[in-house]
Image (cartoon, rainbow, N blue to C red):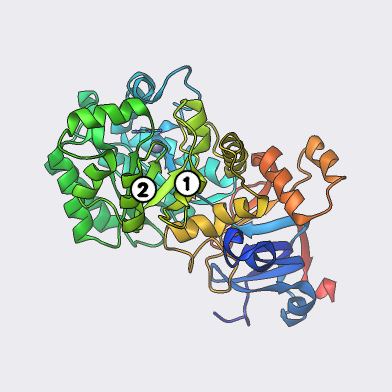
Amino acid sequence: MSQAAPVRALRGRLLSFKADPAEVGAEASCDYHEDGVLVLAEGRIAAAGPADLLLPTLPADTPIDHWPRCLILPGLIDLHIHYPQTQVIGSYGARLLDWLQTYTFVEEQKFKSADHAAAIARFFLAELLRNGTTTAVVYCTVHPESAEAFFAESERQGTLMIAGKVMMDRGAPQGLLDTAEAGYRDSKALLARWHGRGRQLYAVTPRFALTSSEAQLAAAGALLAEHPDAYLQTHLCETPEEIAAVRALFPADASYTGVYARHGLLGPRSLLGHCIHLAPEERALMSDSGSVAVFCPTSNLFLGSGLFDRDGLRDPGCPVRTGLATDVGGGTSYSMLRTLAEAYKVLQLRRQKLPALDAFHLITRGNAEALGLVDRIGTLEPGSDADLVVLDATAVPAMAHRMATIGSLAEELFLLMTMGDDRAVRATYVAGERTLPQDEPMQDAAQALY
Ligand code: GUN
Ligand code: ZN
């Protein structure tokens, strides 16, 4: 990456994490430049540092997007979201199992149509970007067309997305079922076509133990064993009713997590949504395999599923890797800022803490580490992909009013995660390009500044 021919630079307040504040302390965890510059070239970050050092190194005509007062962070990462549920979000009054049958399985049948899938994928990706999310781990539906449409749109947008066709061969209407063989064959073909093509990555996606037969779980495990660099995503221990139903379907297994372990579905690239009600031996299976437990607070509150035990899972005696996600449409917001607000409240009810720096580490570097992608996304390190979000803590009057009494970066971040949403996202950049017509930056040129 040469600094000789940058396509553009960004100027603002740069914030990026080097390590987990919970482990190394707030000071040592982050790089912060009050007046910083990011130099972008060929879709990547070529340099990051203080403006007074970097600006004089730039050719005089370098265009600079200047975001005074705004924070520039790595693009936000959502570890679990369902793109076919954009018209399920906000469905009234159900818990998980009846919510699936009453609303979700009805809506997901529409994705048999490639046109419908393409239209929803377009809306969905635009909505993610409007909220500052540049990478997500995404469930499609059982229809291969749904995954094809999603990846095609992500490729068009240039986003780094991880997605998979759902595998489900029982427990749902006929129109949503594949078979063990077809699920394996279609998933394998999609994986061969999309995993590692440009920025797209594939996740083998058995929906959960209640909608896959023994044969299908075995097929998912076989596919994963054939492609150890692919991801695995599924749901685990979200509600007591679900756990009881799994026990009835798999009476020989000691636990729900044990069902997945027996089929080879756990491992460092396995993302298990929810993990609210794990018994100690299930935590041990998660910990030993390096699997990731994904906290989805807006969903857990909306569906009444329970309160995620983040500190319990992170217990050094049996540490489970954790991440954060929206889980739209069980989740109620596309915004990772709103998701942090609800995470904070869930943890308050558990008498657990989520300091602001830990929170912003979590939705950037933390989630990138959960994906094993920290060398590509989640930081502002030179060499990283230039996926960026520009946040403004004065975006709405009530926030601007509160900002007047705020005196530290940590307080500002806490305001952003408590009151912020899509309105606090002034701009989103994907691979160095500004995406939607959000707000206009001030346009400077290096020459004008020196
Ligand atoms: N468990 C199985 N499918 C789903 C889903 O679509 N959403 C949630 N929240 N849980 C699930
Ligand atoms: Zn989910």
**Residue 346 seen:** yes
Q: Residue at x 34, y 29 (%)?
A: 108
The residue nearer to you, when weighing 63 against 316, is 316
Q: Secondary structure at mark 1?
A: helix
Callout 2: SS: helix
In the image, what residue occupies the spot 41% across and 39% down?
274
In this rendering, position of residue 192 left or right of residue 115: left
Residue 438 x/y as whole percent = 66, 46
Give the quarter of the figure containing the C terminus: bottom right
Compute the Cα span from label 2 to label 1.
9 Å
Q: Which mark is residue 283?
A: 2
Figure quadrant of the N terminus: bottom right
341 sits to left or right of 327: right
Q: Position of residue 47 (x, y in %)?
A: 63, 75
Q: Amino acid at mark 2?
A: Arg
Q: Position of residue 361 (x, y in %)?
A: 59, 56
Residue 26 or 333: which is nearer the viewer? 26
Residue 383: x percent and y percent?
Answer: 53, 73
Viewed as shown, does residue 20 lie left or right of 420?
A: left
Q: Are marks 2 and 1 in contact (CB under 8 Å)?
A: yes
**Residue that carries the numbered disc 1 in the rendered image:** 312
Query: Which residue lies at the image location 66% right of the left edge and 44% below the top edge?
Result: 417
Q: Quadrant of ligand 2?
A: top left
Q: Which tag, 2 or 1, sits closer to the chain's start?
A: 2
Q: Quadrant of residue 59?
A: bottom right
Name the residue type under label 1. Gly
Residue 393 sits above or below residue 305 on the image? below
